[in-house]
């Protein structure tokens, strides 16, 4: 598999190099130079999830990894279910929260951990990542107590739910957390500065577990195939998928799935009030605003890192621009949709409700709709209970985390101070 840096076309790397490097020169993201179509998608959809996923990843990655090795990696990474819940006759919810940290990022985090373990062997690795909510927990649990790996997680203080925070700030050991005074974009900016710092990269063996890492992105492609595999065959021919979008990695994975042959012809990348992409789609002008806090905090991103990948597929004609939709859903409407969906018998946390609204607004009446539930409602227990005026059952894994002590250290959005703190802890 050959990948190119979308900000420096002269930097071309293998899958292994892209995983180990994380971010390319000039803070560019890596993307495949060629996405070829699968030979027989119908046959693939008849396979079990793990077997199918191994074949999809083998198709994308090529011969860099032996098939048996890749299959074993997928078996260890994807050892929990994906569920497609029927909401009504034409709409389904793809539940991606049945993994160990109750969020979709378990897929990418666990597969990346498998890749790093294979590629780095005895080399020192420091995973540096920013999180707007769910990435932190998924990455922390995937790499917890892995030999020769330290994980440094930055999150915006007070701007993620307590349940999200406690899932990763209570682990300790090789997991090091900093509560940054600022927004997720501030955290992401600190990560990018670190990747431009040769001293940090050399001394710490730096890598990133954000969705900028290609291993996480490719892992996410697999569950879109599982969504269609669970659909009745007669409903697979005209499918519209709506993805709650913040950093735009998840919808990027859906687009890759479509490009390589999954029969998904329409995509909605639905945002909250941080609406950089919807405004760009409408005006053609890229003008990020200051990040605004919202109920759907994992999507509080004004400068999405994965947009260049999506833009590339749209500009190259790999995905039809006319079938790509992006709207923003405000706070009041988010709450209204949560109540409307609950009245129909399904509990949706804010991100899921935003995906449902995007589907409702964009989908043609005859199409089959799939909207994504990216996290368990209990991860947003306070807001869900307040909006719906009903109690949400707390899963054991969350209750146990909530009872533990937060070990995160406070940090200003100052790169030099962060660098000094990390060096004092890890060197």
Image (cartoon, rainbow, N blue to C red):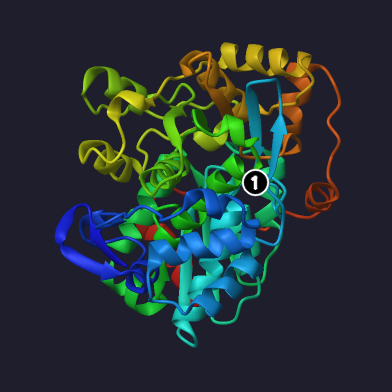
- Considering only vertical position in the picture, is 304 above or below 417? above
Query: Which x, y percent locates residue 43?
Result: 54, 54
Q: How many marks?
A: 1
Sort mark 1 into few (<14), some (14-19) or many (20+) by Cα contacts within 10 Å. many
Point out residue 225 in the picture as x, y percentages from the top left corner. 54, 47
Residue 371: in sight, yes or no? no
**Helix, strand or loop at mark 1:** loop
Position in image of residue 400 (x %, y %): 83, 53
Say if 36 sits above or below 279 in the image. Answer: below
The residue beneath circle 1 is 103
Residue 176, by quadrant, is: bottom right
Q: Residue at 45% across / 81% down in the picture?
A: 120
Is residue 369 or residue 122 the one in the foreground? 369
Would you place residue 283 above or below residue 9 in this image?
A: above
Q: Is 87 positioned to the left or the right of 55 in the image?
A: right
Q: Is residue 4 left or right of residue 271?
A: left
């Amino acid at each position: 598999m050959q990948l190119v840096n979308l900000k420096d076309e002269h930097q071309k790397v293998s899958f292994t190099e892209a995983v180990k490097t994380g971010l390319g020169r000039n803070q560019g993201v890596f993307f495949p130079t060629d996405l070829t179509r699968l030979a027989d998608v119908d046959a693939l959809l008849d396979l079990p999830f793990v077997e199918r996923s191994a074949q999809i990843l083998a198709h994308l990655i090529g011969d860099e990894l032996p098939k048996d090795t890749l299959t074993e990696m997928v078996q260890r990474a994807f050892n929990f279910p994906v569920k497609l819940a029927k909401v009504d006759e034409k709409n389904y919810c793809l539940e991606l929260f049945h993994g160990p940290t109750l969020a979709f990022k378990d897929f990418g985090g666990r597969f990346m951990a498998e890749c790093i373990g294979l590629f780095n062997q005895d080399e020192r690795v420091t995973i540096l990542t920013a999180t707007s909510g769910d990435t932190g927990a998924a990455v922390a649990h995937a790499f917890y107590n892995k030999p020769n790996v330290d994980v440094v997680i930055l999150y915006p203080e007070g701007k993620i739910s307590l349940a999200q925070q406690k899932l990763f700030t209570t682990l300790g050991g090789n997991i090091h957390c900093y509560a940054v005074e600022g927004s997720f974009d501030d955290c992401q900016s600190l990560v990018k500065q670190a990747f431009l710092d040769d001293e940090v990269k050399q001394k710490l063996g730096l890598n990133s577990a954000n969705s900028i890492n290609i291993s996480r992105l490719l892992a996410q492609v697999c569950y879109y195939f599982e969504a269609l595999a669970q659909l009745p065959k007669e409903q697979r021919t005209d499918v519209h998928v709506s993805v709650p979008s913040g950093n735009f990695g998840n919808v990027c994975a859906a687009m890759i799935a479509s490009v390589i042959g999954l029969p998904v012809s329409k995509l909605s990348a639905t945002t909250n009030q941080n609406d950089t992409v919807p405004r760009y789609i409408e005006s053609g002008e890229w003008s990020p605003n200051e990040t605004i806090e919202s109920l759907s905090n994992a999507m509080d991103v004004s400068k999405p890192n994965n947009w260049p990948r999506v833009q590339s597929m749209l500009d190259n004609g790999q995905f039809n621009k006319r079938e790509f939709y992006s709207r923003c859903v405000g706070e009041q409407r988010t709450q209204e949709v949560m109540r409307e969906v609950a009245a129909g018998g399904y509990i949706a946390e804010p991100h899921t409700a935003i995906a449902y609204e995007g589907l409702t607004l964009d989908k043609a009446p005859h199409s089959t709709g799939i909207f994504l539930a990216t996290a368990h409602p209990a991860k947003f227990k306070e807001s869900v209970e307040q909006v719906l005026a009903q109690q949400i059952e707390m899963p054991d894994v969350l209750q146990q985390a909530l009872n533990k002590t937060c070990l995160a250290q406070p940090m200003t959005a100052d790169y030099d101070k962060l660098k000094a703190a990390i060096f004092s802890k890890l060197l």
